[in-house]
Amino acid sequence: MVEHLEFVNNYKDLSTDQGFQYEFDCNRCGSGYRTTFKASITGKISSALDTASSLFGGILGRAASFGDQVHSAAWERAHDESFIEAVKEIKPYFIQCPRCNSWVCRDKCWNVKKGLCKSCAPDLGVEMAAAQASQSVQEIWANAAMAEEDKKLSTEYWREGITATCPNCEKPLASNAKFCPECGYSLKPKDKCPNCGAKLLPDAKFCAECGQKL
């Protein structure tokens, strides 16, 4: 009965004429496992015949050639058998994700709670920590790139009445200043009485609470 071979895209064949060995890699993280080296009997026989041929030539040389042909068929059969054994040996360390069909290592890349690989179902704690770190970096760059006078245009200042020109000298204002840099006129009207602290009415000349002249 023909036995089908798995792991068709995530292994390296390290086999030689002398024996068989394989590396199996995780489709997600790239780490993996290497099987133990298993010597090839046919490879040893072929090597011995080659050595005899080089020493004596002639009949032994023809025997070596015949041995290579036998070795080729026998070695291929042994190679397939060794690969099936290697898959059985390594398969418990891997699992196939039912969503993306990737073979991933159970140790690092499998989300046991969700039954999916961590590419399809990441660990939420890890993602939250990464998101917070990313947000912190963005805030650091944003604040580092913002000049001190530009920070006055941030959200907490938007509700203030910002004047484009000085009402006294009519000079244009380059920033959200408290006093006109040209004539010194106060650009921020007082909203509280300096005497009693009561809230002032717009354009009031005296405090409605204590009569303080403004």
Image (cartoon, grey):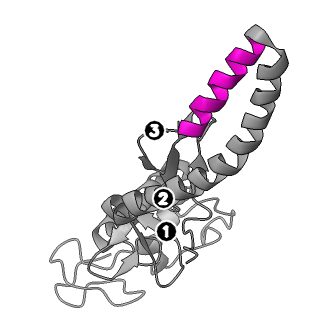
Query: What residue appears at the point 85 percent right and 17 percent down from the top-left corner?
Result: 58
Q: Is residue 195 left or right of residue 39?
A: left
Q: What amino acid does circle 2 point to?
A: Cys
Q: Is residue 201 above or below residue 186?
A: below
Which residue bears the numbered disc 3? 37
Between 211 and 13, which is closer to the camera in this rendering?
Answer: 13
Between 123 and 175, which is closer to the camera in this rendering?
Answer: 123
Q: Alpha-carbon neighbours of circle 1 within 10 Å: few (<14), some, or many (≥20)?
A: many
Which residue bears the numbered disc 1? 103
Q: Are marks 1 and 2 in contact (CB under 8 Å)?
A: yes
In the picture, which quadrant includes the C terminus?
bottom left
Quadrant for residue 11, please give it. Answer: bottom right
Between 149 and 35, which is closer to the camera in this rendering?
Answer: 35
Quadrant for residue 94, please give it. Answer: bottom left
Q: What amino acid does circle 3 point to?
A: Phe
Which residue bears the numbered disc 2? 26
Q: Which residues are drawn in magenta? A: 41-54
Q: Is residue 78 left or right of residue 72?
A: left
Question: In 3D space, how far apart are the residues under numbered discs 2 and 3 (Cα atoms)?
Answer: 20 Å
In the image, residue 163 lies at what x, y percent? 58, 73
Q: Is residue 85 above or below residue 102?
A: above
Q: Which residue is most to the top?
A: 55
In the image, residue 201 lies at what x, y percent? 34, 90
